[in-house]
Image: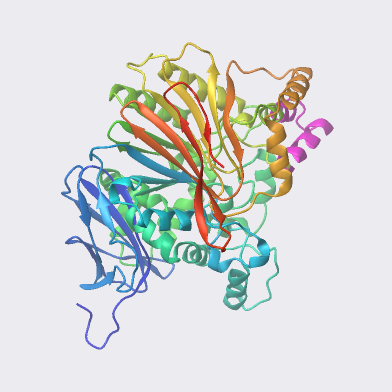
Amino acid sequence: MPLPGRDSPTLMLGPLLRHVDPVSATVWVETDRPCEVEVLGRTAPTFTVGGHCYALVVVEGLEPGSTTPYDVRLDGERVWPEAASPFPQSRIRTPGRPGPFRIAFGSCRYATPSSVELSENIPPDALDTYAARMAALPEDEWPDALVLLGDQVYADELTAATRSWLGLQRDERVDEDTQVRDFEEYTRLYAESWSDPQVRWLLSTLPSSMIFDDHEMIDDWNTSAAWRREVTAQDWWADRISGGLVSYWVYQHLGNLSPGELEENTTWQAVQGRAADAEPVLREMALAADTEPRSMRWSYVRHWGDVRMIMIDSRAGRVLDEHERRMVDDEEFAWVEAAMRSAVDDGVEHLVLGTSLPWLLPHAIHEIERWSETLNGRHLGRPIGWASEKLRQAADLEHWAAFGNSFERLGRALLAVARGEHGRPPSTALVLSGDVHHAYAAELVDPGDLTTRVHQLTVSPLHNEAPHPIKVGFRIGWSRWARRLMTGMARLARVRPSELDWTKAAGPFFGNQLGELVLSGPEARFRLFVGERDGDGQEALREVLDLPLSTPRTVGVTG
């Protein structure tokens, strides 16, 4: 109970329902002061980072396939759900229920609609409208998991409200190009992004899995060795990257871990048992993770019955030497491959790989990125290499295709799964990605001797806007003439061609959007929803695609 004469603690953010398996769940909260947090009779004390208080409550002893409504209590007083909430009560739904398993996914959410100026002309927030849609559906039609594939906050593109807040915080004038500096300023971004009622309820009810992308740290994060040399020489970099990684660890990564992984995580054990502020401990972890990526693995695995998701860090763990470029180092890639083999050993029906950056791009853009990487490596230190580096940074040529060794290695790993080299092949292998501010589906078609159907499913943004040049560029990128042109340029530069080939199955789609996988036994479908306003200005989601992924390919596009 609250101490006499003292105000009750307040729930600042959350609850966020994070890791959920058949028998356990974790619930994350931020509070305004130290207190004891209770969920379903299980309690956890808060820990403090930079003067902010957080807790992660581990709820065990749940039943597989069950639905358990819950509330949140701080020092014994109920603070969630809010009394006037129009949404259904938050609940924990464990895997194992009959019927299809549904995964909602997307990326790139710039703040919230209430904090964005109308002059920015950003379409309706897909996550907000999806929450409203979900609340009106019967529970058995709700998704079972939410996968957020990067750019949950934008540290380098700030709203006018946050710039005003920073001006007061710093006691100085800030301009439109201002970016956040440290952990304290990062907390403002999460408060802005996760406070609106629709998303707050959604995150309290759907188990969420998250991974970062560049804007959570800084645009073009770890694009190349040249980029890194330039940015790490800046005197502000240590505060920026430590603030970004500490906030990511607190707000996102901690909830990605299972109860068993939490028990084995040395950083978590040091933080939760610490009476003093944990920011120095986490700052040390963050700086080590930036300079020695092997010291921290951000990738993780989710077990959902006959569905297995392997989330791959495609930002922090890069090897940037121009002659040894890797999306992740060899040790971590071996971990990914082992997780894929384990999924096959366990007989999963659907293997899902999450990575913020698309693996399969439009062919012309793929060839540009391979061309750029080849010229950079071949002409390092010479004018052609300098020009290629400038183009790489200006055009964001940094996806899997720009790390050719890793692109091919991931392809070989997926082919081994799809051919049944490790055991009975799953029905589908699905690579989920975001980043590129539009949506599309592509399918691997060559080699053609695959039992498993292998797809790239890209959905972005949840709440942002694709500039007109991006729309034009990606439409052209899928065209046959652009592919022929860029393939010719790549051959002239003696770029090693890929043994893989793929075809566009649907898209490109633009606007704010959210994808949904519907997995039922061996069957799989990809649904895509785009936010729009009707004639009365009301926001809603319109389904624009229902694509079978495990049966003969036909595209269903509406509207």
Q: Is residue 107 visible in this depiction of the protein?
A: no
The quarter of the displayed image where residue 500 is located:
top right
> Residue at the location (42% across, 71% down)?
51
Magenta residues span: 371-394
Percent across and percent down for residue 93 are 26, 49
Query: Is residue 325 inside the magenta stretch?
Result: no
* SS majority, magenta: helix
Q: Give the quarter of the figure containing the N terminus.
A: bottom left
Q: Observer-nearest residue: 128 or 489?
A: 128
Does residue 55 appear to the left or right of 125 in the view shown? left
Q: Observer-nearest residue: 352 or 26?
A: 352
Does residue 180 appear to the left or right of 331 in the view shown? right
Q: Observer-nearest residue: 468 or 43?
A: 468
Q: Residue furthest front?
A: 535
Q: Give the quarter of the figure containing the C terminus.
A: top right
Task: Establish if 407 lies above or below 393.
Answer: above
Q: Is residue 558 visible in this depiction of the protein?
A: yes
